[in-house]
Amino acid sequence: MRLKDEVILITGGGSGLGRALVDRFVAEGAKVAVLDKSVDRIRQLESDYGKDVVGIVGDVRSMEDQKLAASRCVSAFGKIDTLIPNAGIWDYNTSLADLPEDTIDEAFDEIFQVNVKGYILAVKACLPALVASRGNVICTISNAGFYPNGGGPLYTATKHAVVGLVRELAYGLAPYVRVNGVGVGGINTDLRGLSSLKMSERSISEIPLAELLQDALPIGRMPNPEEYTGAYVFFATRSDSAPATGALLNFDGGMGVRGLFSTVGGKDLLEKLNIERGDENGH
Ligand SMILES: NC(=O)c1ccc[n+]([C@@H]2O[C@H](COP(=O)([O-])OP(=O)(O)OC[C@H]3O[C@@H](n4cnc5c(N)ncnc54)[C@H](O)[C@@H]3O)[C@@H](O)[C@H]2O)c1
């Protein structure tokens, strides 16, 4: 119970990573408010958690909805200690060559509105409460905030923009509000595509991500949504993370340390060190 009496507001907390964050923060003793566009998911959260979670149905692209979420959170729980801008959409790695010319205006606006403007509006709406609590912001980024091929040019540009946002806000809101980012990697969620590219009915869960990432990641497997939550608990825990602002944590299974010729540089370590397979953890 590291976060007893702390209050967290998460956007996109109805599904996937956001839902895992709600579960983890409640387990850590926090009260949680969630802004999500899905009525069903918000209802589910409220029925699962009763008074520990307040749900607000709304769109992250709307200042009005973001302000409603901030004020409902403060009226239910008295404050906001941590804001997690997290709701996002994906472009299914659509390359520039494959982007039809006449969709670019709309697709660009759609993905930047959700993935970037949605984050800016969330911080704007929560700013008075965050300054009052000397709180912090933890932005969900992505491996696509750092490396190519986690999306097409549109998605990758939005996630790089969030990296810039973390740095700018960390500077601009200091010394009152700390702002950090977590560059999570592939996760089996319900991440959706852009409606302007006719991809809103597609879900990342239909892609065999676990299989693809098994060979692509140095850690050798795709992490579960729950395994990504510890980084957020760290940044939200004042006593552990006070020096961190403007910090970007690559938390993606090691995408930045893949080798030129193979993904796993130490795959023959067990043989070299005469350690039986299954003895890796010392038993
Ligand atoms: N799934 C992955 O492999 C992966 C990898 C790296 C980063 N991410 C990032 O993780 C974050 C969470 O995505 P996820 O994978 O958990 O997806 P998800 O679709 O399972 O969850 C996102 C939630 O956000 C909500 N949402 C979407 N658009 C919204 C809007 N306009 N207004 C309000 N709510 C909205 C959805 O209803 C959903 O409940 C995103 O920022 C995504 O870019 C995901």
Image (cartoon, rainbow, N blue to C red):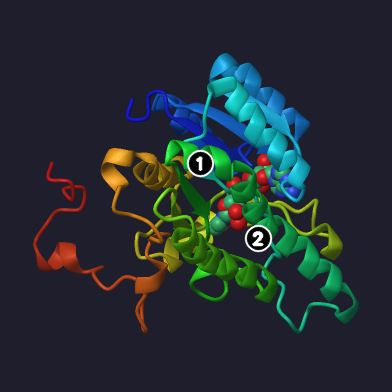
Q: Nearer the viewer, residue 230 or 119?
A: 119
Q: Is residue 233 above or below residue 32?
A: below
Examine the rendering and report whether any part of residue 278 can be seen. Answer: yes
Residue beneath the point at 32% across and 30% down:
2
Residue beneath the point at 74% across and 59% down:
113
Q: Is residue 122 above or below residue 164?
A: above
Q: Could you tell me the amino acid type at mark 2?
A: Val
Residue beneath the point at 62% across and 54% down:
119
Front: mark 2 or 1:
1
Q: Is residue 203 left or right of residue 104?
A: left
Indicate if the residue with disc 1 has its beta carbon within 8 Å of ligand 1.
no
Q: CA distance from mark 2 to mark 1?
A: 19 Å
Which element carries disc 2, helix, strand or loop? helix
Examine the rendering and report whether any part of residue 150 can be seen. Answer: no
Q: Position of residue 80 (x, y in %)?
A: 51, 34
Dividing the picture into quadrants, the one containing residue 267 is bottom left
In this figure, which residue is indicated by the disc labeled 2? Answer: 116
Dividing the picture into quadrants, the one containing residue 12 is top right
In this figure, which residue is indicated by the disc labeled 1? Answer: 130
Q: Dot 2, how many residues are within 10 Å of its Cα: few (below 14), some (14-19), or many (20+)?
A: many
Q: Position of residue 74 (x, y in %)?
A: 58, 28
Q: Dot 1, how many residues are within 10 Å of its Cα: few (below 14), some (14-19), or many (20+)?
A: many
| The C terminus sits in image quarter | top left
Which element carries disc 1, helix, strand or loop? helix
Residue beneath the point at 45% across and 40% down:
226
Q: Is residue 244 left or right of residue 87?
A: left
Residue 88 has which mark? none
Q: Position of residue 5 (x, y in %)?
A: 41, 23
| The N terminus sits in image quarter | top left
Q: Nearer the viewer, residue 159 or 258?
A: 159
Q: Could you tell me the amino acid type at mark 1?
A: Leu
